[in-house]
Image (cartoon, grey):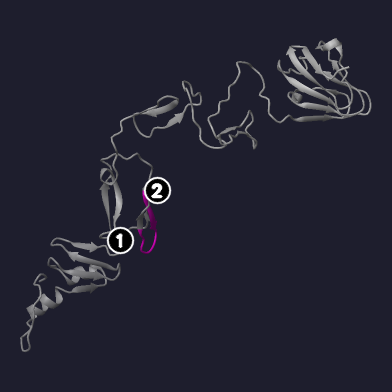
Amino acid sequence: MAGLGRKTFSTGDVLTASDFQGYAVDQSIMVFASTTARGTAITSPAEGMFTFTTDTDTLSYYDGSSWVAVDLAGDITGVTAGDGLSGGGTSGTVSLALDANELTAATAVSTDYVVIEDVTDNTTKKALVSDIVSLGDITGVTAGTNLNGGGTAGDVTVNLDAALTGLTSVTIDGASPIVLEGATADAYETTIAVTDPTADRTITLPDATGTVALKDIELSSQTASYTLVAADAGKLVEVSNASANTLTVPPNSSVAFDVGTQIVVVQQGAGATTVTAGAGVTLRSKDSALAIDGQYASAALIKRATDEWYVTGALA
């Protein structure tokens, strides 16, 4: 009968047939060729008996009413890593590991948990977000003067308002604090640079429209009769030619110089340079003289109206 447990025999003890049957036979794993052979040999099995049948390589035990097969091999054919995990496999020993890159992003609140590695005992644990960082007590961000943006929840952004209205004064530090890109975004910019002042300085802009003149006048060198172009505004146009030549002031419909534009003309060559009017242009000069009075002499052209210019200087 199975279930007798274990018994220790001493030298000289008599091993009875009942002892042998109960301890040695019924409580061993008995091997049979098939379940049919087992049923023939064990007509009255006892609860707890184990048998092994070689035709199906099955280990079974008797539960008191029937033989129950023990699954030794299992039926798992593969392990797939789910959300937040990496690893897995379909054969041998497989491993799974936590992989944060496989998780979707979320906005944490104070009652959420995060997974941490406790370096004190080298174990993985969970921790409340509120225990890790201080969430602060800011409830809203309001954009002030010349700012836009702000908000009352989540991540908020505040930007400088490009209009910059309402400012009474601005102090900008640096030797070159202002960089202007211009109409085209390219590799070229205009930088407004400031020489370090030794006292307070003031630059006053007039109540007028026009082009700011630079201290260093640019040259426009010509070698033949020439018609002014827009780029000549504020320049010194020098004409170098051994023969007589003309410098033509174009009508406003062709080149729209601003009223007040000034252009200096120098006769650099031996050939006489004469200022002439384009279609519809009126040139006003003393005694209607428009020829520059010799080599290296000069005249100034000043636009006073849409198609009207003053011509002053060394004229003949």
How many angstroms separate mark 1 from mark 2 (CA)?
Answer: 29 Å
Reply above or below: 288 against 57: above
Q: Which residue in the structure is indicated by mark 1?
A: 74
- Quick one: 19 or 44, which is closer to the camera? 19
- Quick one: 45 or 10, which is closer to the camera? 10
- Quick one: 143 or 19, which is closer to the camera? 143
Residue that appears at 78% across and 23% down = 264
| Picture quarter with the C terminus | top right
For label 2, the SS is: helix
Which picture quadrant has residue 271?
top right
Residue that appears at 64% across and 17% down = 209
Q: Is residue 97 visible?
A: yes
The amino acid on which the numbered mark 1 sits, given as a three-letter code, is Gly
Residue 138 on image: x %, y %: 31, 33
Q: Which residue in the structure is indicated by mark 2?
A: 102
Reply above or below: 81 against 227: below
Residue that appears at 5% across and 89% down = 12
Q: Is residue 245 magenta?
A: no
Reply above or below: 141 against 94: above
How busy is the neighbourhood of tag 1: few (under 14 within 10 Å), some, or many (20 plus)?
A: few
Residue 70 on image: x %, y %: 24, 63
Residue that appears at 31% across and 64% down = 73
Residue lying at the far right of the rendered structure: 243
Q: Is residue 81 visible?
A: no
Magenta stretch: give its range.
84-95
How busy is the neighbourhood of tag 2: few (under 14 within 10 Å), some, or many (20 plus)?
A: few
